[in-house]
Image: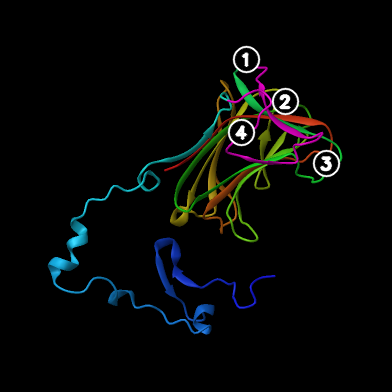
Amino acid sequence: GHDQGSTIADPLFYDPYNYDFRLKEGSPALKLGFEPIETDKIGLLGSDEWVNLPKTVERNWPDFWTAEREVADDFDDYEIGSHPVEARISGADGPGSIAVVADSDGGDRCLKFVDAEGLERGWHPHLYYNMFFGRGQVDFHCDLRIEEGATLYFELRDDANPYHVGPSLWIHRDGSVKANGREIGKMPADTWVRFGIECGLGAKADGTYNLKMGVTGQGTKAFEDLSCDREFRQLAWLGYSSVADEHQIFYLDNFNLRIH
């Protein structure tokens, strides 16, 4: 189904995450007749004064190069019944729904997921955020509250095809929580629990991440060097799905993703 005149394959760069784009022997680009560029022979030519002139220019780089980048939502500024504008939603236009509600625990507002029997997809209703971060350190946290029997997951992915899964948390109907398949504890029903994730991207990615989980005001459990896909190096997707084929409910609040 791809362009018949194209080749879709790993170009076999030496070390792209450290900006070494030389081609290894056997690269499909070489087989197509691509001639590697001798990068040491390109750029400004002439006197030292001329060649070094660009180094004297002061540049005001855009914020996304220099500042911490953040995607955050506490849902407090939305109308009751509305959807968060930064996120994409599917499977929430029938018996299944995702909508802003007033928090029954005395907080302001949060996001309510309602699952139902017979939805078109097993992972409906579903909410996700698209982004692209290729380097840095991920610092993410969110608050979740489940009703008895809720089954859901949330995870980080890249944009490969097929995608690679980074940190992934599954909460099963008995309240057990699994981090990329490893059971780490139980989540009580009708209680806000905060999850925190730290992991590296780009050259900092090593197939592991750190996780914190705890009920507000009752301490936090920390888990270090949990395993995820070693090919996960870029963050392009973060999503939540309810996977119960029956009427079940969970809540999301204080979504905060920061890259530094």
The numbered mark, 1 or 4, whose residue comes first in the sequence reads 4
In this view, the residue in front, 192 or 179, is 192
> In the picture, residue 242 is in which quadrant?
top right
In this view, the residue in front, 62 or 125, is 62
Q: Amino acid at mark 2?
A: Ala
**How many C-alpha atoms fall within 10 Å of the one at disc 4: few (<14), some, or many (≥20)?**
some
Residue 119 got which mark? 3
Task: Tell me the colour scheme of the image.
Answer: rainbow
Task: Mark 2 vs mark 4: give the one in front.
Answer: 4
Left or right of 164 on screen, residue 148? right
Task: Tell me: residue 192, above or below residue 45.
Answer: above
Residue at mark 4 to residue at mark 3: CA–CA distance? 22 Å
Residue beneath disc 4: 84
Residue beneath disc 2: 189
The residue range painted magenta reads: 78-105
Q: Amino acid at mark 4?
A: Pro
**How many C-alpha atoms fall within 10 Å of the one at disc 3: few (<14), some, or many (≥20)?**
some
- Disc 1 is placed on an element classified as loop
> In the picture, residue 96 is in which quadrant?
top right
Q: Main secondary structure of the magenta part?
A: loop
Residue 94 position, x and y percent, is 80, 35
Task: Tell me: residue 157, above or below residue 125.
Answer: below
In this view, the residue in front, 212 or 257, is 257
**How many C-alpha atoms fall within 10 Å of the one at disc 1: few (<14), some, or many (≥20)?**
few
The numbered mark, 4 or 3, whose residue comes first in the sequence reads 4
Left or right of 154 on screen, residue 122? right
The numbered mark, 1 or 2, whose residue comes first in the sequence reads 1
